[in-house]
Image: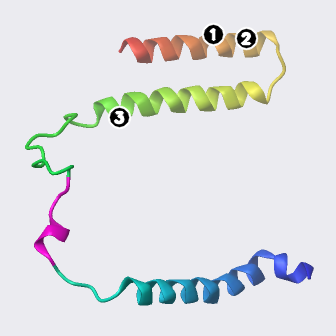
């Protein structure tokens, strides 16, 4: 019974199971009909916007850097003991986050 729980065997058992489920889903879905409404952009019945909401990637990268610094910094602090070095690291982490927020 433990052999069934090993990842390679379980993977090989799940492939046919997934293929059967996909086949049943295709049978239940019925034939595909092309329609211009299916390929058009849907936005609650409104026309799609003509301009982008946020120009460029700068807002995304600011948020991404904030969370990267925060999460990696907390990961480093979580693996250390409270010493003078870790307190200095925490101070530097706070300064980096404040500098990133203020831009």
Instruction: Determine the residue positioned at 34% across, 87% down.
Output: 30
The C terminus appears in which quarter of the rendering? top left
Disc 1 versus disc 3: nearer the observer: 3
Q: Mark 1 sits on what residue?
A: 91
Assign a secondary structure to mark 3.
helix
Assign a secondary structure to mark 2.
helix
Is 41 left or right of 69, judged from the image as shown? left
The crowding category of the residue bearing disc 1, from other C-alpha atoms within 10 Å (few below 14, some 14 to 19, many at least 20), is few
Q: CA distance from mark 2 to mark 1?
A: 6 Å
Question: 102 or 42, which is in the foreground?
Answer: 42
Which label sits on residue 11?
Answer: none
Q: Mark 2 sits on what residue?
A: 87
Position of residue 25 measured from the top left corner of the image (x, y, whole percent)? 47, 83
Instruction: Determine the residue positioned at 51% across, 16% down.
Output: 96
Does the segment drawn in magenta span residue 37? yes
Q: Mark 3 sits on what residue?
A: 60
Assign a secondary structure to mark 1.
helix
Question: 61 or 25, which is in the foreground?
Answer: 25
Q: Which residues are magenta?
A: 35-42
Q: Are marks 2 and 1 in contact (CB under 8 Å)?
A: yes
């Amino acid at each position: 019974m433990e052999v069934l729980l090993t990842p390679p065997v379980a993977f090989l058992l799940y492939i046919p199971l997934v293929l059967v489920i996909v086949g049943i889903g295709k049978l239940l879905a019925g034939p595909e009909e092309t329609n211009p409404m299916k390929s058009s952009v849907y936005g609650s019945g409104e026309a799609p916007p003509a301009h982008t909401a946020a120009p460029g990637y700068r807002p995304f990268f600011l948020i991404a850097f904030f969370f990267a610094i925060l999460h990696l910094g907390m990961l480093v602090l979580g693996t250390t003991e409270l010493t003078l070095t870790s307190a200095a690291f925490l101070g530097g982490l706070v300064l980096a986050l404040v500098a990133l927020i203020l831009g």
